[in-house]
Image (cartoon, grey):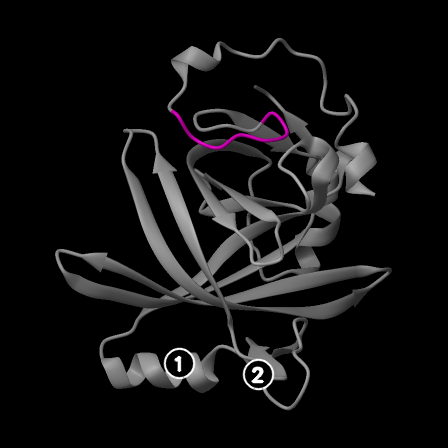
């Protein structure tokens, strides 16, 4: 669906800003570092009561951009906003609008520091990937199941570009879950163990985010 719809002019025909004035960072779908986008307020009003998200903004300013090369040959783009959220765009077989397969808006739900190597090892072995993940009274079910009894977290590395020109690299071990909301809607849950080196030390944390699918009709790119 996204291969065709995001390739159209559904987001409007505003003239694009001068690329030379932007930081060198990933771009797709008219989204770029320092740009902005809007979500349909009616869409948010209708779906938000069913979600963990509370008080989601419909206008977002992009303050950082992440890019991940997936083992499947695809690419994951993340556009971090001023509302403690990120718009995630996944492509397969290329990095143009015609290759988009999935778009979700995620909000950070909780972040916990991992203080020791033993805690980190336990998190990777059994804390991220489970058949069922319970959060705030609701159950989410694992989406990425491997063949056999074990489905380890998916390992990936994200390079993040910030507005001041800095870049950073974070190793992530993630698992995707979903719970059914009815009417063909789901709430997604992303559980991630994140690790980066800061001053020659391991900086590790558990990051939990919840999100929902975004369609072409839900979003306007402001440029």
The answer to which of 23 and 180 lies nearer the viewer is 23
- x and y percentages locating residue 91 in the rendered image: 65, 44
- x and y percentages locating residue 96 in the rendered image: 66, 32
Measuring 49% from the left and 24% from the top, which residue is drawn there? 35
* Residue 130's disc number: 2
Determine the CA span between mark 2 and mark 1: 11 Å
* Residue 76's disc number: none
Looking at the rendered structure, the number of numbered marks drawn on it comes to 2
Measuring 37% from the left and 37% from the top, which residue is drawn there? 161
Q: Residue furthest bottom?
A: 149
- Tell me the SS state at disc 1: helix
* Residue 123's disc number: 1
**Where does the magenta region start and end?**
24-30
**Relative to 171, residue 101 above or below:** above
Number of other residues with Cα within 10 Å of mark 2, as a class: few under 14, some 14 to 19, many 20 or more: some
- Tell me the SS state at disc 2: loop
- x and y percentages locating residue 89 in the rendered image: 61, 43
Measuring 39% from the left and 25% from the top, which residue is drawn there? 24
Which quadrant: the C terminus?
Answer: top right
The answer to which of 145 and 58 lies nearer the viewer is 145
Our reading of the magenta stretch's main secondary structure is loop
- x and y percentages locating residue 11 in the rendered image: 72, 24
Q: Residue furthest left?
A: 199
Marks 2 and 1, the one that precedes in the sequence:
1
Which quadrant: the N terminus?
Answer: top right
């Amino acid at each position: 669906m996204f291969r065709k719809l995001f390739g159209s002019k559904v987001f409007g025909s505003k003239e694009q800003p001068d690329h030379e004035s932007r930081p060198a960072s990933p771009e797709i779908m008219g989204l770029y570092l320092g740009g902005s986008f809007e979500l349909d307020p009616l869409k948010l009003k209708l779906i938000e009561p069913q979600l963990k998200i509370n008080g989601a903004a419909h206008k977002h300013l992009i303050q950082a951009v992440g890019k991940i090369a997936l083992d499947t040959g695809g690419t994951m783009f993340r556009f971090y906003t001023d509302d403690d959220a990120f718009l995630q765009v996944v492509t397969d077989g290329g990095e143009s609008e015609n290759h988009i397969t999935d778009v979700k808006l995620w909000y950070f739900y909780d972040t916990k520091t991992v203080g020791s190597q033993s805690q980190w090892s336990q998190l990777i072995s059994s804390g991220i990937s489970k058949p069922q993940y319970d959060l705030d009274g609701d159950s989410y079910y694992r989406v990425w199941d491997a063949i056999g009894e074990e489905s380890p977290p998916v390992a990936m590395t994200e390079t993040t570009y910030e507005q001041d020109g800095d870049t950073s690299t974070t190793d992530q071990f993630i698992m995707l879950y979903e719970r059914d909301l009815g009417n063909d809607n789901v709430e997604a849950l992303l559980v991630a163990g994140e690790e980066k080196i800061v001053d020659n030390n391991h900086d590790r944390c558990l990051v939990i985010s919840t999100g929902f699918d975004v369609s072409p009709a839900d979003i306007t790119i402001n440029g």
